[in-house]
Amino acid sequence: MITRELLKVVDVNIPAPQYVLLKLDAGKPMKGLIPGMFYELRAPSQAGRLFKPISILEVEDHLLSFLIKVIGAGTEAFAHLKAGDGVEALGPLGNGFPSINGRRVLLVSGGAGYPPLAWLKREADEAEFCLHLHGCATADEVFPCDLLYTVDGSQGHKGLVTDSVESLISDHKIDLVLSCGPVPMLAKLTNICIQVEHYVSMEAYMACGIGVCHGCAIPVDSDYKLVCKDGPVFDATRIRWSEL
Ligand SMILES: Cc1cc2nc3c(=O)[nH]c(=O)nc-3n(C[C@H](O)[C@H](O)[C@H](O)COP(=O)(O)OP(=O)(O)OC[C@H]3O[C@@H](n4cnc5c(N)ncnc54)[C@H](O)[C@@H]3O)c2cc1C
Ligand code: FES
């Protein structure tokens, strides 16, 4: 059930420059959540401004964790929170990724697209095979994964996270690719994954988060779909990438 509540901050950490790891107490065991689902969150200093859509990183009974990249005022406000503060939370929202049960899966994340794939990787036991690739600009944005790519080569492989996807798909007989990151990365992956099922978690500017304002519409099939209500996870082949 979607609720709008004030959730108590249990912990705030800076795990990497420009990132905040926020743990909130949902006040009750959180059941039935799926990787790819998100919350609309707002720090108290942002009252009157828009909520910020943030994917769930981890669920531990009544605790919800979020990994947030600070890029503007709304996300920066989370970095100034302290344990005991309240955060306005609307959620859980969105559809989440399809099951990886029994599949041979490649998880591909870029930058702040890391959280839902990291959650899926923790459930890798369900899959027949599961490899998590993460790509970022520099060593400053590195988080645990199986194969790391940095654009400047400061850690892991030098290059883009998409560089070896084609050969990994064929070497490991991958039958499902799940991805989240910047649009150019997702579009490139879609071109690579012609023969493989591929689902993407899309980003969009959001206002209401519940399908009312239509601010998050993206071109899907011959129509438009709402990232907050119909997504954020979509079959990549259904998105009209050239119109984004
Ligand atoms: C479903 C969903 C899940 C998300 N999950 C996470 C998450 O787990 N962790 C995380 O760090 N971020 C996540 N985001 C992105 C996050 O919501 C935005 O970074 C945040 O709303 C920016 O707010 P702001 O007020 O800090 O910056 P703003 O002031 O809104 O923007 C600062 C700058 O960034 C640009 N910008 C802002 N949002 C976007 C966007 N969506 N795409 C491209 N450019 C943008 C603006 O044009 C501006 O130049 C998610 C987004 C969606 C839609
Ligand atoms: S954010 Fe309002 S419809 Fe999606």
Image (tube, helix red, strand yellow):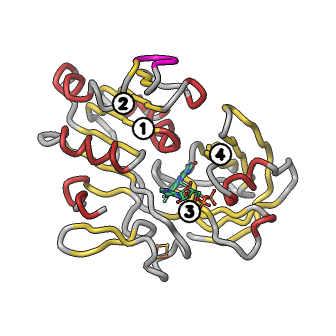
Image position, residue 213 (x, y; %): 48, 82
Label 2 – label 1 distance at C-alpha: 8 Å
Main secondary-structure element of the magenta-colored stretch: loop
Q: Amino acid at mark 4?
A: Ser
- Characterize the local packing of mark 4: few (<14), some (14-19) or many (20 or more) Cα atoms within 10 angstroms: many
Please say whether residue 155 is one of the residues in the magenta stretch: yes
Callout 4: SS: strand
Q: Look at mark 3 in the image and give the residue it sits on.
A: 92
Q: Look at mark 2 in the image and give the residue it sits on.
A: 161
Identify the residue at image location x=39%, y=52%. Answer: 201
Callout 3: SS: strand
| Residue 191, picture quadrant | top left
In the visual, does 152 lie left or right of 80? left
Query: Is the CB–ligand 1 distance for label 2 below 8 Å?
Result: no
Callout 2: SS: loop
Q: Going from the N terminus, do you reach mark 2 or mark 1 first?
A: 1
- Between label 3 and label 1, give the one nearer the viewer: 1
Compare residues 242 and 96 and report the one nearer the observer.
242
Location of the N terminus by quadrant is bottom right
Residue 65 is marked as 4
Identify the residue at image location x=12%, y=40%. Answer: 195
Q: Which residues are magenta?
A: 153-157
Q: Going from the N terminus, do you reach mark 3 or mark 1 first?
A: 3
Q: Amino acid at mark 2?
A: Val
Residue 212 is marked as none
Q: Are marks 3 and 1 in contact (CB under 8 Å)?
A: no
Q: Amino acid at mark 3?
A: Pro
Image position, residue 36 (x, y; %): 45, 51
Label 4 – label 1 distance at C-alpha: 18 Å
Q: Look at mark 1 in the image and give the residue it sits on.
A: 109
Identify the residue at image location x=47%, y=23%. Answer: 152
Image position, residue 126 (x, y; %): 38, 33
